[in-house]
Amino acid sequence: MQRYLALLLFISSVWGQTAIAVFDLDNNGLNKSDIRLLTDRLQSELVKIGGYTIVERKKINEILNEQKLTMSGMVDDKHLINIGKMVGAKLIVLGNIGKVASIYTISARLVDVETSEILKSANYDAGNSLANMLTIGMNNVAFQLIGKKNERLLTYNDDEKTLKNQNAHKDLNIENDRISIIKIKKRLSSDGSNKVYVTYRQKISYKPTEIMIDWLDVDGIPFDGDKKYTKSKVKENEIRVVSFYIPNESVNYRVWLKD
């Protein structure tokens, strides 16, 4: 155990980044395999945000095995905080996930192992789609926990008929290295349903990307989401459109791009 601790402390000091240990989410009625995949995705999303060292699950499991503990949800927070210290983490991520009626929901928190203080908390409701929890929810939770705003996240306000950047930029500026969004408009489709139409310009030929949308409730809280892949055979500077059906319970929405 001592050699593992020494190795982790050395790695942390070399890279000069705060280490975070992500523990399996407490399971409230889902399949164990789903919990493992969702926890792995949350850890992956934290890695992509950057700025922190994420402790490998293998190292955490080695300590748990030495102490004859498991990641089954039977370990209380105090023990997990101590394990976080043992693997060289300054912060740990704890949380739970389950289903209430037809809604999948996750609650997570970022905890300082020295003070046991909850520094950040995060919540996400994914409607009745566990796939949305995986593809959209974990990214959302990761950004809430790290405390960084997604600069490409936009909110559309139907009352004001304007696009507003979460960072209060006045101009529409949502893009990644492959496309740029040039217009987002809500209108009635030919089949009588309400849809959001996202117009984009291709920046690099033949490079598809993902356009993401979160559906918001009356309090501005995401409860579901969707995504669309852009076309793979689009040339540089071509203009294309993707559309999303608006669920009846959606009051608002926000559009963003994956890097």
Image (cartoon, rainbow, N blue to C red):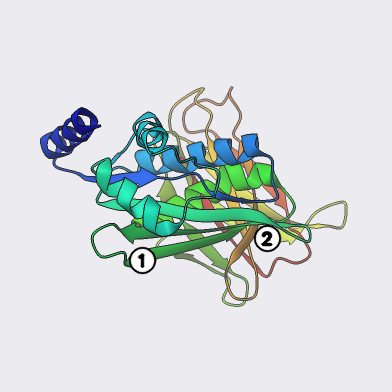
Task: Report if residue 158 is visible in the image.
Answer: yes
Q: Nearer the viewer, residue 78 or 124?
A: 78
Residue 194, percent across and down? Answer: 77, 59
Please tell me whether mark 1 sits on a helix, a strand or a loop.
Answer: strand
| Residue matched to label 1 | 118
Where 23 sits versus 127, above or below? above
Residue at the (64%, 38%) spot, across then down: 32
Q: How many marks?
A: 2
Q: Nearer the viewer, residue 155 or 110?
A: 110
The quadrant in which residue 160 appears is: bottom right
| Residue matched to label 2 | 186
Residue furthest to the right: 191
Residue 168, percent across and down? Answer: 37, 68
Please tell me whether mark 2 sits on a helix, a strand or a loop.
Answer: strand
Where 69 sits versus 195, above or below? above
Foreground label between 1 and 2: 1
Where 239 sits versus 103, above or below? above
Screen quadrant of the N terminus: top left
Residue at the (32%, 67%) spot, across then down: 117
Q: Nearer the viewer, residue 226 or 30?
A: 30
- Judged left or right of residue 147, residue 115 is left
- Judged left or right of residue 23, residue 128 is right
Residue neighbourhood size for the residue with mark 1, other residues' Cα within 10 Å, grouped as few (<14), some (14–19), many (≥20)? some
Task: Report if residue 152 is visible in the image.
Answer: no
Q: Amino acid at mark 1?
A: Ile
